[in-house]
Image (tube, rainbow, N blue to C red):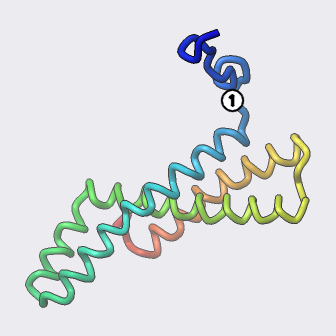
Amino acid sequence: MKKQNLPLSPHLQIYKPQITSILSISHRITGVSLNFSLVILVFGIFSLSLGEVYFKFFLEIISSVPVKLILFLTILGFSYHLLNGIRHIIWDFGLFLDNKSSAILGYIIIILSFFSSMIISNILGIFS
């Protein structure tokens, strides 16, 4: 069989998505996207170093609705990535590795990340 005619890996065609695989993919996506959210932090620090006028302009931009949505999604991604990382550390200790407890822990991570991001966003005043 020629190398060009080899079948693709059947993992996406055969296996149905499980909570653990979806959370694993989401963990990688949030890790990469958190790197891009550092741009907001860099602009804030840069505007602070330029003076009061530029920092006030930065504060006006950051208080707009689209940027508040981006900030909330960033906080959500951060809290999910953090909690899912803790879940991976728990797995490294050999705990909750069976299918049922792994799925339950995955759902707990999703719920906790939403609640913690709502609390953090409320504390930071993103919703006001």
Q: Position of residue 32 (x, y in %)?
A: 47, 56
Between residue 11 and residue 125, name the one nearer to us.
11
Relative to 10, say whether 17 is above or below. below
Q: Position of residue 39 (x, y in %)?
A: 30, 67
Q: Give, as a three-letter code, the residue at label 1.
A: Pro
Q: Quadrant of the C terminus?
A: bottom left
Residue behind mark 1: 17
Which residue appears at 90% of the width and 60% of the height? 94
- In the displayed structure image, the side of residue 98 where residue 78 appears, left or right: left
Which residue appears at 11% of the width and 81% of the height? 54
- In the displayed structure image, the side of residue 49 where residue 41 appears, left or right: right
Residue extending farthest front: 2
Secondary structure state at the residue bearing disc 1: loop
Give the quadrant of residue 81.
bottom right
Q: Quadrant of the N terminus?
A: top right
Residue extending farthest left: 53
Task: Give the total of numbered labels.
Answer: 1
Which residue appears at 67% of the width and 58% of the height? 84
Q: Position of residue 72 (x, y in %)?
A: 41, 60
Q: Residues within 10 Å of mark 1 (few under 14, many from 20)?
A: few
Give the quadrant of residue 67.
bottom left
Relative to 3, say whether 42 is above or below. below
Which residue appears at 68% of the width and 20% of the height? 10
Q: Position of residue 124 (x, y in %)?
A: 41, 75
Give the quadrant of residue 12.
top right
